[in-house]
Amino acid sequence: MFSRKQNNKASVSNDMANKQQRYEALVLALHSDIYRYAIWLVKDKAVAEDIVQETFLRAWKSLDSLKDEKAAKSWLITILRRENARRFERKQFDLVDIDDVSVIDESLSNEVQIEHRELRAIMASLSEEYREPLMLQIVFGYSGDEIAKQLDLNKNTVMTRLFRARNQVKDALEKSDTQWEVQNG
Amino acid sequence: MDDLEFRRTLYADPNCTDENIIKAAADDPKKRAFIKELKELDAKMCDASQVNVPKDLASKLILRQTMHCHELSKKRNRINLALAASVAFVMGISFTLWQQSNLINMAEHAIAHVRAEGSYALDANENISIEQVNAKLASFGGELSGEIGQIYYANFCDFDNVRSLHMVMQLNGQKVTVFVVPNKAEYDNSSRSKDKTYQSQAVDFNRASLVVVGEDGADMTQAKQTLSQNFKFSA
């Protein structure tokens, strides 16, 4: 009886160690992607970090429900989006625009930096319903079907939003180009 | 495929692998350039979106979860401890109660003894002196002092396998049987009992107990009081 109990205990702590390993692997593999998604979703560093913390803590609590490691990313995004929605239920934060925050990679050349800053500003200026599917497509490489599933939308709606998102980015880029030419012409 | 639809489809997904798109692009270098331009824009947007991730974020995430687990296990340990304590408490209480309920009811045993013996002791009619009684009581460390009524019978006998003194005496005008029994842990020496013809009560005297058996209706309280006054047991 006692030896059996000990075996049980050993297997329980083994399970715990396994879970811990799985969790740490999950954090290391996906925290960057999830953080970037959060940044583009809320456009604020501190809030993004908070949401990512909450997301991973929730992920830990229900880690057993994650059966397929391939689904981990979209699972985490779903938790993250829910956490973001919950934040709005709790309290509306004062958000800082992403172009005000210094998120610039110092290692890049000046020219590229300026280009990135401009693009960031344009992407940040997109409304959330356009920004989110665009991020999923560009950064996460999701297909139209996958985005539709992740955001719980109709595929046609997703494609329309993606089209409008690129249209707006293009327009904004052209506008700034002509401004540039006017200023320098 | 007209130009508008071509643009619309590619704006939605520059990496579209639709056959019509590929065919249309193959025939027209302008369209190929358009696709290239869009893909470049995507790549730029992807680069631009790669904001720096705080270096310690992964460690923070793991730390937070570890702390959370630690708190949980501490809470669980407390609950386990409380559970174990309650179980021990209940076991202790029930053991005490069980032991108490298992005490031998001296009064009941005395009635049974008197009934089994029948008239042998009750009908005896000797007149035993206090000195004789005291000689027998001495083995229990007891002494009878002062006058009580006539003592008809006084002899050692077996009370639940224990040597005890069996006496029949006149007490306040009633004929009662008194047992002197050395105290034992399993005796309930405050027990009382009653049946159709007899009633009985035990009185505790530190070293020994007295058990009085009288007929039903006799005044036991008074009998007990008289006995308490006249019997002395040295410590």
Image (cartoon, rainbow, N blue to C red):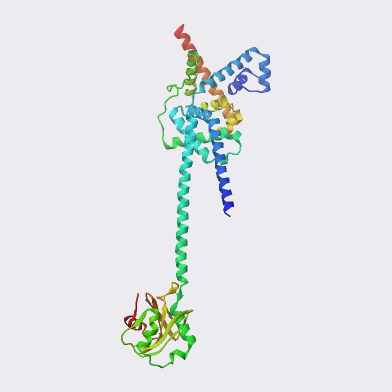
Point out residue B149 in the picture as x, y percentages from the top left corner: 34, 89
Side of A28 relative to A184 (left or right)? right
Depth check: B94 or B167 in front? Answer: B167
Depth check: A181 or B191 in front? Answer: B191
* Image quarter (top left, top right, bottom left or bottom right) of the N terminus of chain B: top right
Q: Residue at the top extreme? A: A185
Point out residue B224 in the picture as x, y percentages from the top left corner: 35, 81
Tell me if residue B168 comes above or below residue B100 in the rendering: below
Tell me if residue B32 comes above or below residue B101 in the rendering: above
Q: Is residue B210 visible?
A: no
- State the count of labels: 0
Side of A85 relative to B225 (left or right)? right
Depth check: A133 or B197 in front? Answer: B197
Depth check: A113 or B202 in front? Answer: B202
Residue positioned 44% across, 78% down in the render:
B106
Q: Quadrant of residue B35?
A: top right
Point out residue B22 in the picture as x, y percentages from the top left corner: 67, 19
Point out residue B197 in the picture as x, y percentages from the top left corner: 44, 86
* Image quarter (top left, top right, bottom left or bottom right) of the C terminus of chain B: bottom left
Q: Residue at the bottom extreme? A: B125
Q: Is residue A9 visible?
A: yes
Q: Quadrant of residue B221?
A: bottom left
Q: Quadrant of residue B186?
A: bottom left
Residue positioned 61% across, 30% down in the render:
A145
